[in-house]
Each structure stands twice: as C-alpha cells, then as structure tokens.
Amino acid sequence: MKRAEGPRLSAILLAAGSSSRLRQQKQLLRFHGESLVRRSARLLMSLDLATVAVVTGCRAKPVQEEIQDLPVVISHNDAWEQGMGSSIARGVANLPEDVDGVLIAQCDQWRLERNDYFRLISAWNSDISHIYAAQWLHRITSVFGPPVIFPRNLIHELKNLDEKRGAKCIISRHRRTTQFVNMENAAFDVDTEADLEALPSGSWRFPNS
C-alpha cells in the first residue's frame, strides 16, 4: 500500500457483527451491486493510509471472500460475540506500532464518500494530538460517532476497551481534546429492517436475492 506523506494514519474497518436486528448480515448486503464491506474497504484503500485492517467475526469466510483481492490486513476476532470493544481491540493489535493515529470506521455507513474521509483526515492533520469524530444532526440534536480518528497516545486505551463497549467511552473521557467534523452522510447506516425500508428502492439487495 502506498504510504501517505506526513503523519502515518491506519484504519480499522469493523465488519465482525451478526447484524441481529437486521436479520441479515449487513457486511454482505449489496448496494449498487457491491457489498458494504467491500465498498467501505475500497474507500479506505483509496485514502493512501499506512494500513487498512478489516476485523471479521461472524461468518468470516464469506466476508473475507468479498475483499480477498484487496491489499488489506484481515484481523479475525474469535470473540466477536462479546461486543464491539473486542473487535476494536483486536484490530488495533494488528496495526503497525509506529502509526500516529487510528481511524475507526463501520461498514454500514452507506452514504459516506471519499471526500467525507478526506475532510476528517485533513482536520486531524491540523493537530494529530486530538480526537476527530464525525458529527451530524439527528432531528434537532447534534450527535457524534464514526468515522473517528484517535491519536497515537490513546491507542493503548483502544487496546484495552471493555469488550461490550465501543470507543465512545474514550471520547467521553477526552472531550477537551476532541474535535467534531460536520458529516451528514455519516448519519445514514443500516441497523434495522426499518432502515432498509427508508432507502431508495432498487439500490439494495441481500446476498441471496
């Protein structure tokens, strides 16, 4: 993978869950003919990062087959059922030790584009000692979530996350050094069947349809 100039940033793509609320594995859901896990991995690969690690778990084989031709690091989490924290910790453990930051992404944010990631990375480049998280408006409330970049000095906290909890607890502990980047496209994900029903018709299909 081509190394970007300046600070070294690696990415973790979370693709380990069972998508129980959706009743289908979202990683394999196809959007305009491309699985969500492949689309997300391809976008991250286009950013010239130091490393892109994809964390697999539930039904790891078909997920891995979707990205087997991409130069990503496959990081399998045997303990995926224990929660998102375990997948983040597993992914971080497989990254190079000399990175300056870690970008954590989820594969179901289907409206994210390359420019969204570029804006987040550009903001982080202005001060690589801070956390940079996506922020969007939910009804009348501003909320935040992935994608998010954590600086090098917090990598040890990612490695030691509680198995059931995600990385928001780290952001809560470090709010003074957290910056937010407006990213309305990050608001769109696929967690439930209702999320699918709200999507443009004709764009989606399940892997067996």
Image (cartoon, rainbow, N blue to C red):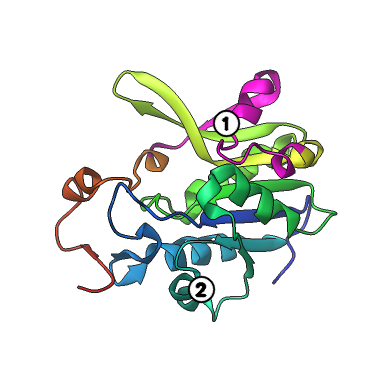
Residue located beneath label 1 in the image: 168
Looking at the image, residue 83 lies above or below residue 38: above
Give the mark, 1 or 2, whose residue is nearer the N terminus: 2
Q: Is 193 placed above or below 3 here?
A: above
Question: Viewer-proximal residue, 29 or 178?
Answer: 29
Residue 43 location, x and y as percent? 50, 62
Q: Residue at the location (49% across, 55% down)? A: 114
Q: Position of residue 206 (x, y in %)?
A: 25, 66
Q: Would you identify the image quadrant in which residue 25 lies?
A: bottom left
196 with respect to 150 (left or right): left
Residue at disc 2, secondary structure: helix
On the question of residue 50 being in view, the answer is yes
For the residue marked with disc 1, what is the amino acid?
Answer: Lys
Q: CA distance from mark 1 to mark 2?
A: 27 Å
Q: Which residues are magenta?
A: 157-184
Whether 179 is among the magenta residues is yes
Above or below, 45 against 150 in this view is below
